[in-house]
Amino acid sequence: EPEVTQTPSHQVTQMGQEVILRCVPISNHLYFYWYRQILGQKVEFLVSFYNNEISEKSEIFDDQFSVERPDGSNFTLKIRSTKLEDSAMYFCASVKDRFNGELFFGEGSRLTVL
Amino acid sequence: AQSVTQLDSQVPVFEEAPVELRCNYSSSVSVYLFWYVQYPNQGLQLLLKYLSGSTLVKGINGFEAEFNKSQTSFHLRKPSVHISDTAEYFCAVSQTGANNLFFGTGTRLTVIP
């Protein structure tokens, strides 16, 4: 069964460093998402991406964050200068049909900022 | 905007007993409703979804949920739980025609042998 894959599974970084989280969505999916889950809190929407551009973003997704699809298969989330409060589990998701309603999630990348 | 409330943060239940996990939502527009499960150290897996049609929705692993528009609820039920059902359960809502999900804070179901 096709699945969304994410790397790394866990990354530890120093505050102020840049981090790139990578995702490979399901191959025939067209819409891509990043969500995050701070430990013990709800899963929060960050950004959605379609046709090589951001279609929607939350207030969490500030100038420190960026996304791109560099090669037609990977979908990346970059945090330019990490802060302690960026420590969270980051989930990538994809969906084929915008109106289908079912997002397929990866297993997540745990980011720890020291 | 949409929001989801899961009133129960933790639900312990004995094996083979029935369980109901509560979910209430608020929205000014039509919505899609979902339940996701998160097993330890894993991602989110879709249990079931309501898009339209029958208000009783059956999902994987013997779970079902009922959409109640008048009460703005989408409670998850299972008649007999197993140890393997121990996990975190998230209710989520999205506006119809959109995919951005708004999640509740989750309910940790613990099945006791």
Image (cartoon, coloured by chain):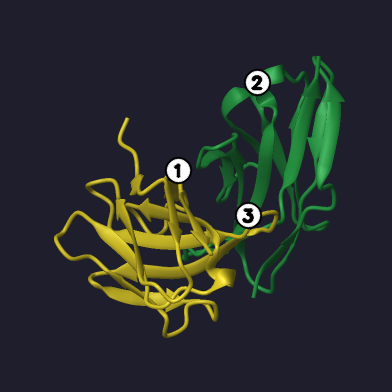
Q: Residue at x 53, y 64 (%)?
A: A114
In the displayed structure image, the side of residue A60 where residue A63 appears, left or right: left
Which sits in the foreground, B80 or A76?
Answer: A76
Residue bearing the label numbered 3:
B92
Find residue A47 and report its horizontal and vertical position in percent.
Answer: 43, 70
Find residue B17 and report its horizontal and vertical position in percent.
Answer: 84, 19
- Mark 2 to mark 3 CA distance (whole Å): 22 Å
**Shown colour of chain B:** green
Find residue B32 and report its horizontal and vertical position in percent.
Answer: 58, 56
Q: Output the chain of dot 2.
A: B
**Cβ atoms under marks 1 and 3 closer than 8 Å:** no
Q: Output the chain of dot 3.
A: B
> Neighbour class for label 3 at 10 Å: few (<14), some, many (≥20)?
many
**Shown colour of chain A:** yellow
Q: Is residue A2 above or below residue A104?
A: above
Q: SS at mark 3?
A: strand
**Cβ atoms under marks 1 and 2 closer than 8 Å:** no
In the displayed structure image, the side of residue B68 where residue A88 appears, left or right: left
Which sits in the foreground, B100 or A15?
Answer: A15
Tags 2 and 3 both on a single chain: yes
Residue bearing the label numbered 2:
B84
Tags 1 and 3 both on a single chain: no
What amino acid is found at the position of numbered circle 3 in the picture? Answer: Ala
- Mark 1 to mark 2 CA distance (whole Å): 18 Å
What amino acid is found at the position of numbered circle 2 in the picture? Answer: Ser
Say which mark, if any, is on residue A107.
1
